[in-house]
Every structure is written in C-alpha cells, then in structure tokens.
Amino acid sequence: MTTKKYNPTESELEILQILWHKGNATVREVHEVLEKVKDTGYTTTLKIMQIMTEKGLLERNTSNRTHIYKPILSREKTQENFLNKMLNGLFKGDESRLVMGALDKKELSQNEIDEIKEFLKQFEDKKS
C-alpha cells in the first residue's frame, strides 16, 4: 500500500495521537480514550477510522474478529509533513520566520531554552 502525502484533519489527528501513544488498538479502545476529552459517539469514531484507512493514514488488521488499527505514518513523519506544508505555504520557505514566530508566541522554560541552544549548537557543528 502506498501512503499519500496527506495532512490529517483535527479529528483524525486526535485519533492518531491516541494510536501513537497506544500502538495498535481497536476502535473501542480508541473511542474510550477519545470520549474522555470529546463528546463523540462510537459510530463516529468507527467511521472516521474507516475513512482514515481508506486515505492511507491507518492500517487495519482483519485477521481476527476484532479489527486492530495502527498508524501508517509515525508521529515524526506527520509532523514533518505539517511543517513542510506550513513552511512552503504560509512562510514561503523562510525557515527563520517560522522558527522565530513559533518561539515568540510561547513562554519558554529554561530547560526548553537549553534544549534549543543545544540543537542549534549541533546544527552549527554539522554545517562546519
């Protein structure tokens, strides 16, 4: 199965977050987590997951009576796709504006600042 470069909707992202955390899961298992934070019916969760399977976001194992779903793309790959779309669309390829805009809107802890500094240091070392 080929995976399209597809950006999930907000509801699909909520389901992906659950599956990235749990690994493989049934619709019922996903729904039990989802309904704690969102008023949604079981059949709605089922339908969204069926659509996600058709779109190539989820893989469904039907070898047992209970169908098991798992995400096809990793969290990291999905984040990369989102960032590329945002970078090339909204920011027109200007990486520094994207990063500065993200950092400017959030109050960072000292730990987060240290992580960013370390990342930049490693980035500079690779460039040398």
Image (cartoon, rainbow, N blue to C red):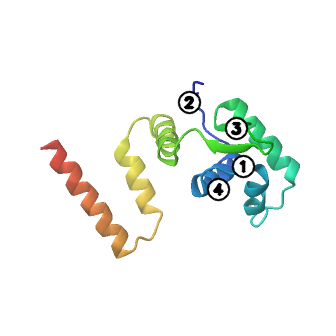
**Sequence-first disc among 2 and 1:** 2
- Image point (74%, 59%), residue name: 34
Q: What SS does tag 4 mark?
A: helix
Q: Looking at the image, is mark 4 or mark 2 nearer the viewer? A: 4
- In-image side of 59 versus 114 (left or right): right
Give the Cα distance between marks 2 and 1: 18 Å
The image position of residue 8, as x and y in percent, is 64, 41
What's the amino acid at mark 2? Lys
Say which residue label 2 marks: 5
Give the Cα distance between marks 1 and 4: 11 Å
- Residue 114, by quadrant, is bottom left
Give the Cα distance between marks 3 and 2: 19 Å
Say which residue label 4 marks: 18
The image position of residue 38, as x and y in percent, is 78, 62
Say which residue label 3 marks: 60
Q: What SS does tag 1 mark?
A: helix
Number of marks present in the image shown: 4
Check disc 1: other Cα within 10 Å, few if <14, some if 14-19, many if 20+: some
Say which residue label 1 marks: 11
